[in-house]
Amino acid sequence: MRQLGQAVSQYQMIEDGDRIMVCLSGGKDSYTLLELLLAIRERAPVDFELLAVNLDQKQPDFPAHVLPEYLAAKQIPFHIIEQDTYSVVQRVVAEGKTQCALCSRLRRGSLYTFAKQQGITKIALGHHRDDLMETFFLNLFYNGKLKAMPPKLRTDDGAHIVIRPLCQIREKDIAEYAEMKQFPIIPCNLCGSQPNLKRQMVKQMLQQWEQEDRHRLDVIHSALQNVEISHLADAKLFDFVGLYADENPSIDEGLELVAL
Ligand code: SF4
């Protein structure tokens, strides 16, 4: 709760009058997200609405009753969008190729469209601290970009703000919490897709680093919030061309002492 509260206030994720759509996949992260947002709403100084939304992608063995039963029992307002993105993914992605990229894109499209129709102001996703760091290293190793997953983001069409309130919480803690709460978890890979091997590899690399030094991931996470643009090399972000020595340089006391 403390880490969620910190993220919400640091990035001003929630404001008075917000109508927040909580995307619920049935995995441990999204159940945790919903539970914590419900709890924080009780004590928040601002008033906001939560609507849990699940996209039923029509995977063959998707247990469609699980989420409605869970949400109705807890009296949480919800909506299930039914859209057969499963067949599209099966048709379009070549056999043996990972389907998750297209599947996620289609899922995002359906959710954003629904959000637009419903006058949603914020879309909350359940990505956690490990997701952010894994994405950072995936972009570094495979895309040649220094880029992670932002805690708050405006969608490409400018219509929505996406928030990631779990962005400071470790996956391990979420897994423990989900276990403790006994959420009725629905596995994501019902579609039979292969796991994303590159992401798996990065995940293992981070786990290995944490075994070697239990603070290393904390340090990396801090680094993502502490960027020195002038000490990287992107001329689009920092004006290296216009950089000249100061005509009236400040006195460096260390150098003065050496001179003495
Ligand atoms: S595992 Fe299946 S359902 Fe989950 S994102 Fe990948 S393709 Fe989609």
Image (cartoon, rainbow, N blue to C red):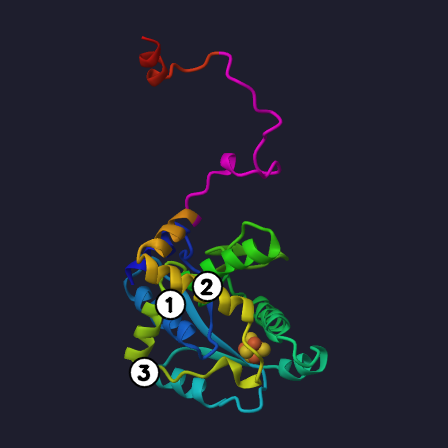
Residue type beneath disc 3:
Gln
Which residue in the protein does label 1 denote?
A: 171
Q: Position of residue 50 (x, y in %)?
A: 42, 69
Closer-to-camera residue (216/7): 216
Which quarter of the frame holds ligand 1? bottom right
The residue depicted at 31 percent of the width and 64 percent of the height is 40
Q: Report the magenta residues as a range.
A: 224-247
Q: Quadrant of the N terminus?
A: bottom left
Q: Residues within 10 Å of mark 3 (few under 14, many from 20)?
A: few
Q: Are marks 1 and 3 in contact (CB under 8 Å)?
A: no
Distance of label 1 from label 3 (alpha carbons):
16 Å
Checking the image for residue 182, the label placed there is: 3
Tell me if residue 168 is in the magenta stretch.
no
Q: Quadrant of residue 159?
A: bottom right
Residue that protrudes farthest toward the top in the picture: 260
Q: Residues within 10 Å of mark 1 (few under 14, many from 20)?
A: some
Residue 62 position (above or below residue 227): below
Distance of label 3 from label 2 (alpha carbons):
22 Å
Q: Position of residue 242 (x, y in %)?
A: 60, 25
